[in-house]
Image (cartoon, helix red, strand yellow):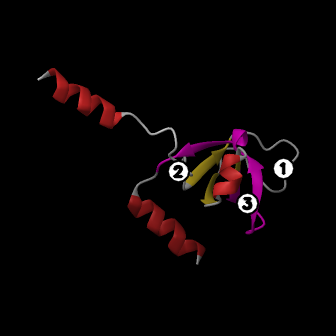
Amino acid sequence: MQAASSRTAARSRPSRTRRRVPPRFVVCIDNSDYEASLELHKTYAVVPDPDALEDGDLRVVDESGEDYLYGSDRFIAIEIPKALERAMFKKAS
């Protein structure tokens, strides 16, 4: 019985080699030096960029409508309901 629970515990541990999954949306918490490009407390879409994520950056679609790299410490990742996500992307297109 104990062996089965050990296997379950081992399966639930995250793999060290697994890549972090980038967030789909973030909220800006620091726009210093980028006041024209980022608005405090605004939600932004993140463009997947594994290389940027490894370097501690996020590729964010900013106020210009283009995607640029910013330090991930300027943002907090959020999860939003799928219905809201669809509505946000529909509005953007």
- Magenta extent: 58-79
Residue that numbered label 3 is attached to: 62
Callout 2 touching callout 1 (CB < 8 Å): no
Residue at the right extreme?
33
For marks 2 and 1 on the same chain, the one whose residue lies earlier in the sequence: 2
Q: Position of residue 10 (x, y in %)?
A: 32, 32
Residue at the bottom extreme?
93
Q: Is 61 part of what is drawn in magenta? A: yes
Q: Amino acid at mark 1?
A: Glu
Q: Residue 37 versus residue 58: which sits nearer the camera?
A: 58
Callout 3 touching callout 2 (CB < 8 Å): no
Disc ID at residue 7:
none
Disc ID at residue 35:
1
Indicate the quadrant where residue 75 lies. Answer: top right
Q: Residue 55 versus residue 17: which sits nearer the camera?
A: 17
Q: Position of residue 41 (x, y in %)?
A: 66, 44
Callout 3 touching callout 1 (CB < 8 Å): no
Q: Disc 1 on helix, strand or loop?
A: loop
How far apart are the alpha carbons under marks 3 and 2? 20 Å
How far apart are the alpha carbons under marks 2 and 1? 27 Å
Q: Residue 33 versus residue 70: which sits nearer the camera?
A: 70
Left or right for 16, reference 12: right
Is residue 57 positioned above or below 88 on the image? Answer: above
At 24% from the left and 33% from the top, the residue drawn is: 8
Q: Amino acid at mark 2?
A: Val
Q: Amino acid at mark 3?
A: Asp
At 57% from the left and 44% from the top, the residue drawn is: 77
Disc ID at residue 21:
2
Q: Nearer the viewer, mark 2 or mark 1?
A: 2
Q: Nearer the viewer, mark 3 or mark 1?
A: 3
Q: Nearer the viewer, mark 3 or mark 2?
A: 2
